[in-house]
Amino acid sequence: MALPYIGTDAMQMHLDEISTMVARGAHAVLLLDRAGWHTTGMLTVPKNVTLIFLPSRSPELNPVEQIWQYLRSNWLSNRVFETYTDIVDAACDAWRRLVDSPDVITSIGMRDWAHIGQK
């Protein structure tokens, strides 16, 4: 399968890659929306990974939705792309810019309610 296409095969690759990056004795928890490729019974979820699904139609609970909004607002909106390659290049450039600013990622994904009762 060739990326950047999304589907069950790509999701399986994603889960397998995450699993290899989890430290021995640790466990990864993924917060996911209910996209078909996240919820399909055709996935083999590694033993060191747990999937937690958000309620349907709740993008406000999904921090990655705010990440996409930030990318669109800052680098991808109000532009015309000539080719598919131009779109991919612009998306990759925007992603690299964001990754270079971990403090921005943290601020976008932070939820005050997620820290109630925690120190």
Image: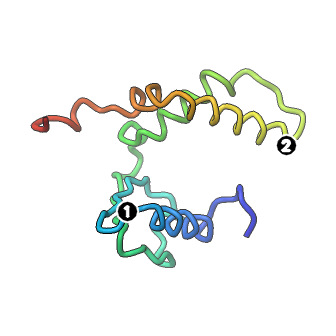
Q: Nearer the viewer, mark 2 or mark 1?
A: 1
Residue depicted at 84% across the width and 43% down the height = 84
Q: Is residue 91 left or right of residue 10?
A: right
Residue 72 position (above or below residue 46): above
Residue at the farthest left position: 117
Residue 90 position (above or below residue 18): above
Dot 2 or dot 1: first in sequence order is 1
Identity of the amino acid at label 2? Thr
Secondary element type, mark 1: loop
Residue depicted at 30% across the width and 63% down the height = 26
The quadrant the C terminus occupies is top left
Q: CA distance from mark 2 to mark 1?
A: 36 Å
Residue 79 position (above or below residue 48): above
Residue depicted at 34% across the width and 58% down the height = 29
Residue 49 image position (x, y, % from top left): 37, 67
Q: How many marks?
A: 2
Residue at the farthest front position: 24
Q: Tell me, for residue 43, which label it has, or none.
A: none
Residue depicted at 85% across the width and 43% down the height = 85
Q: Is residue 25 left or right of residue 37?
A: left
Identity of the amino acid at label 1? Ala
Residue 91 image position (x, y, % from top left): 70, 37
Residue 5 image position (x, y, % from top left): 70, 59
Secondary element type, mark 2: helix
Q: Which residue is mark 2?
A: 85
Q: Which residue is mark 1?
A: 23
